[in-house]
Image (tube, rainbow, N blue to C red):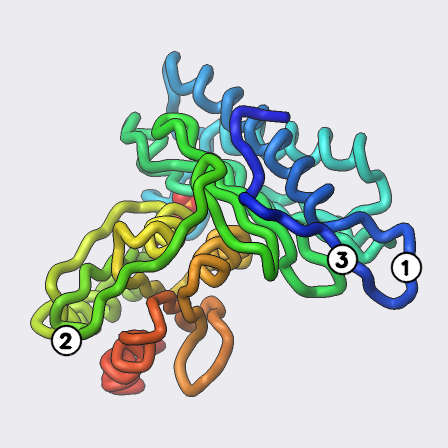
Amino acid sequence: MGAGRVAAGATGGVRSGGMADRPGAEELLALAVDVATEAGQLALRGRAGTVAAESTKSSPTDVVTALDRASEALVAKRLLEARPDDGILGEEGADATGTSGVRWIVDPIDGTVNFLYNLPNWAVSLAAEVDGEVVAGVVYAPALGRTYTALRGAGAALDGTPLRVSAVESLDMALIATGFGYTVERRTAQINVLTRVIPKVRDIRRMGAASLDLCSVAAGTLDGYYERGLKPWDHAAGGLIATEAGAVTGGLDGAPGTEALYIAAPPAIFGFLVDLLAAEPRADRD
Ligand code: LIP
């Protein structure tokens, strides 16, 4: 078992479609913790040396380092060694359908810009999806020494200690995190939204890693989080951790959280945060 520990009181039964050999979620989580820990340790060792952007994606500031790629390659190698028939989807290109009904969703270094600048808020995010539903997730933050885990229906934990969202009762007292895209157009639209949010909440935080923002909502060290532009690997594990800690997650108009908008908050303020974000003119959503 890696540095992390699985959620307290985990139950593992994942049974679907008579696939009696389908592994339990607890078994998938244990594998995820081991693999994420090994990949995170690889990245942490690399961070001790020189780290530079190896390429860019949507803009010159949307960087990829060699360690993003090395982390994802290690995750894919270890998972397919253990479970060769599984699928995988990764931020840096891993993409296999698999035949087992299990698909792994990985962000090999979430918070890449933080990693590049040697800021500690970055993580390996790894989730196990069974028949399209995430059942287990781990977010391992090596520089912070934290392992967040969750099993669907069995709670969320930080280093084995159960997590619970904050008891915030009103939006005007809520500490809300968000993030911004990498293009000028997207960032301009996001600032327009932020100018409407800031007067209505306690304060804003922008910490640079969606998975850790979601884990902070789970831990109650944030009262809520929203962001437009997230990919499945940004929120697959962190979204389960937040949900299992008592958060509501979703998008606008009762939709699930998607790239269009991903929101996570305790039930007491979730609807108010959705209403605040929905108040934006539609032109700002494009
Ligand atoms: C990051 C997200 C973060 C977002 C950043 C970036 P990456 O993911 O976790 O929430 O604001 O712009 O997308 O690219 O570091 O894996």
Q: Position of residue 16 (x, y in %)?
A: 82, 65
Between the residue at mark 2 and the residue at mark 3, the CA separation in whole angstroms equals 43 Å
- Is 176 on the left or on the right of 87, as rendered? left
Mark 1: C-beta under 8 Å from nearest atom of ligand 1: no
x 29%, y 63%: residue: 224
Among the two numbered marks 2 and 1 on one chain, the one whose residue lies closer to the N terminus: 1
Instruction: State the residue at coordinates (35%, 74%).
Output: 267
Residue drawn at 72 percent across, 30 percent down = 78
* Mark 2 surroundings within 10 Å by alpha-carbon count, few (fewer than 14), some (14 through 19), many (20 or more): some
Q: Look at mark 1 in the image and give the residue it sits on.
A: 19
Given this view, does label 2 or label 1 mark the residue nearer the observer?
1
Query: Residue 14: which numbered mark, if any?
Result: 3
Which of the two residues, 191 or 239, is positioned nearer the viewer here?
239
Is 122 situated above or below 91? Answer: above
Q: Please identify the quarter of the rendering in which residue 249 is found.
A: bottom left
**Label 3 neighbour load within 10 Å: few <14, some 14-19, many 20+:** some
Residue 283 visible to the viewer = no
Where is mark 2, residue-wise? 196
Q: Position of residue 153 (x, y in %)?
A: 60, 61
What amino acid is at disc 2? Arg
Going by the numbered disc 1, the residue's amino acid type is Met
Secondary structure of the residue carrying tag 1 is: loop
State which quadrant residue 15 falls in: bottom right
